Every structure is written in structure tokens, then in C-alpha cells.
Amino acid sequence: MPDKKIKKLINDNWPKTKKEFERVLKTTMQLLSQGETYLKEVSEKGLKETKKISLKLKKEKMYYELGKLVAKTPQSKLGNNQNIKDYVSEIKKLSKTDKK
């Protein structure tokens, strides 16, 4: 006897409950999708900023190394020093990359 009452109760309420479950599932999926999109945007922005900072630090290091090299190179040999030319060339490349 109690089994019939339970079955009747389930059969009477299941369509409403099913609709609510489907609505909750749909809403949850939409929220997850929005969260995923937001997380991707934040990650991409963070990655771009990290790359910019990395390039700036690399350029600062190159300036430092260039300064050390220039300081220990005699003035008469500054124009002919290939290492100095290489550093200047690399700094120019980093500056162009930094502007992009």
C-alpha cells in the first residue's frame, strides 16, 4: 500500500521536478560558460602583462650589460667593438617587440 502512494506521489510530481532540474542545469551551464570566458580573458591579459614585463626586464639587463662593456672598453675602440654593436642591435629588437 505505501509503495502505491510513493509511486503516485513521484508520478504526480516528477514532471514539475524534471522541469526545475532542467532549468537549474541550463542556468548552471550558462554560469559556467561565463566563468570560463572570464577566466580565459583574465589569463590572456595576465600573460600579455607578464610578457611585457619580461621584455622590459630583459631590455634593462641588456642596457646594464652594455654599460659595463662600454665602461671597460677604451674610447678609441668603441666604434669597432662587435659586442657593443650586438648589444645595441639586440636592444633595438627588444624595443620594437615591446612596442607591438
Image (cartoon, rainbow, N blue to C red):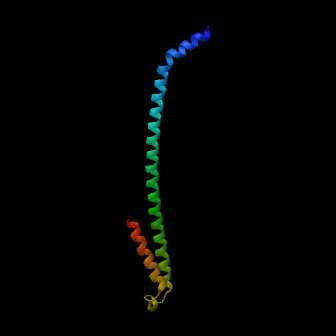
- The residue lying at 46 percent from left, 71 percent from top is 60
Q: Position of residue 45 (x, y in %)?
A: 43, 54
Q: Position of residue 25 (x, y in %)?
A: 48, 32
Q: What quarter of the picture does the N terminus occupy?
A: top right
Q: Nearer the viewer, residue 24 or 72?
A: 24
Q: What quarter of the picture does the C terminus occupy?
A: bottom left
Q: Residue furthest top?
A: 1
Q: Nearer the viewer, residue 67 or 41?
A: 41
Residue 16 vertical placement versus 64 (above, below): above
- The residue lying at 50 percent from left, 15 percent from top is 12
Residue 55 vertical placement versus 65 (above, below): above
Residue 93 vertical placement versus 85 (above, below): above
Q: Please give the count of numbered marks on the rendered protein.
A: 0
- The residue lying at 40 percent from left, 71 percent from top is 95
Q: Residue furthest left?
A: 99
- The residue lying at 57 percent from left, 10 percent from top is 5
Residue 5 vertical placement versus 26 (above, below): above
Q: Position of residue 97 (x, y in %)?
A: 41, 68
Q: Residue 31 is drawn in which quadrant? A: top left
Q: Position of residue 92 (x, y in %)?
A: 41, 75
Q: Residue 52 is drawn in which quadrant? A: bottom left
Q: Nearer the viewer, residue 75 or 36?
A: 36
